[in-house]
Image: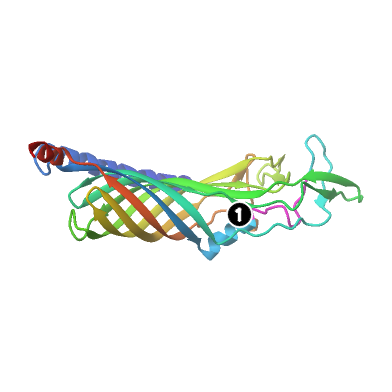
Amino acid sequence: MKTKIASLCAAAVLSILAFATSSSAAEDGFYDKDHIRGFVSFGADFRGMTEAFNDYVNKVGFAGLNGGTLRHKGDSTVYRFATNPKYSKFNQFYPALHFNIGAQYKQFLTWFDINFALTQISERPAKSAQGMDENAKYSTFPLYDARWFNYGADWMFGWKVLGEDEFFNLIPAVGIGFNMMNIHFTSNYIVTNTSSSEETIMRDRYYSTIAATLNAELEARLQFDQFSVGLYGGYRVIRYNELNVEGANLDTESFNTDNDGDTWFVGLRFTWTFLSPWAKKQQDKL
């Protein structure tokens, strides 16, 4: 995890240095700040998991259902479900929403893409289920909906291939960022710390893991003066770290939680570009 975060930080520092250098160059006349235009956009897309990512959420999200041990808080007795509750698996496709804010200088664009994946839910088959200890003594344990969602942000850099204000344009872009995966488990399972053997119990809450991202996309855009609409698609590389639950990492060998969360995506984006100071001056002259 430390290596991944360090790599992301290094890339961010290099980007900031490049931005600072260009800002300094602006004072020497390399570009005219009066031609910089801000923009905002909203988008929505469908994302498709790789097979490894789909296995990840279906294996980790239901950790404990197959032979997992349960225990009541303050009780040392260990239970297992007498019969495994039947949950449906998570789908390989899911929707996401985006909000972008950035700036354009002639054909060059840079922006922050803030994205939110809608919560995916596998509903509990019942409010509770029977657990059984080694002496065939039964006890009731709550069942929760299995849930997962993610959110993140990417710092993107793009280029209008066919010109600054063409009616039709192609915009390739790349960027780096982070992504946060959040998972809610199905019941109060025991988690054992592999180094200290200390046991804790999962709670009725989300548990999270963070990852560095590399995002690449291509947008086909139609521009109507300040308003534009674009169809975009691409691929997002995500490398999730081990999932920490109540202070202990889930066993990597059993659940493969140090996994990739790569997704491909296709969606629609609506953009509003503000007038530059130069454009406003031209309007004032009319």
248 relative position to 49: left or right = right
Labels in figure, total = 1
Q: Is residue 143 magenta?
A: no
Kind of residue at disc 1:
Thr
* Residue visible at 91% across and 51% down in the picture: 136
Where residue 88 appears, as percent x and y from the top left, is 67, 59
Residue at the spot of label 1 = 252
User: Furthest-bottom residue in view?
Assistant: 51
- The answer to whether residue 177 of the structure is visible from this angle is yes
115 relative position to 280: left or right = right
4 relative position to 254: left or right = left
Please determine whether, in this image, residue 93 is positioned above or below residue 242: below
Please determine whether, in this image, residue 188 is positioned above or below residue 63: above
Where residue 190 appears, as percent x and y from the top left, is 73, 45
Mark 1, other Cα within 10 Å: few <14 / some 14–19 / many ≥20: few
* Residue visible at 76% across and 55% down in the picture: 85
Please determine whether, in this image, residue 235 is positioned above or below residue 15: below
Q: Quadrant of residue 55?
A: bottom right
* Residue visible at 84% across and 49% down in the picture: 130
* Residue visible at 84% across and 54% down in the picture: 82
Where residue 25 appears, as percent x and y from the top left, is 14, 41
User: Furthest-top residue in view?
Assistant: 74
Q: Main secondary structure of the magenta part?
A: loop
Q: Nearer the viewer, residue 14 or 138?
A: 138
Local secondary structure at mark 1: helix
Region rendered in magenta: 60-70
User: Furthest-front residue in view?
Assistant: 286
Q: Nearer the viewer, residue 1 or 177?
A: 177
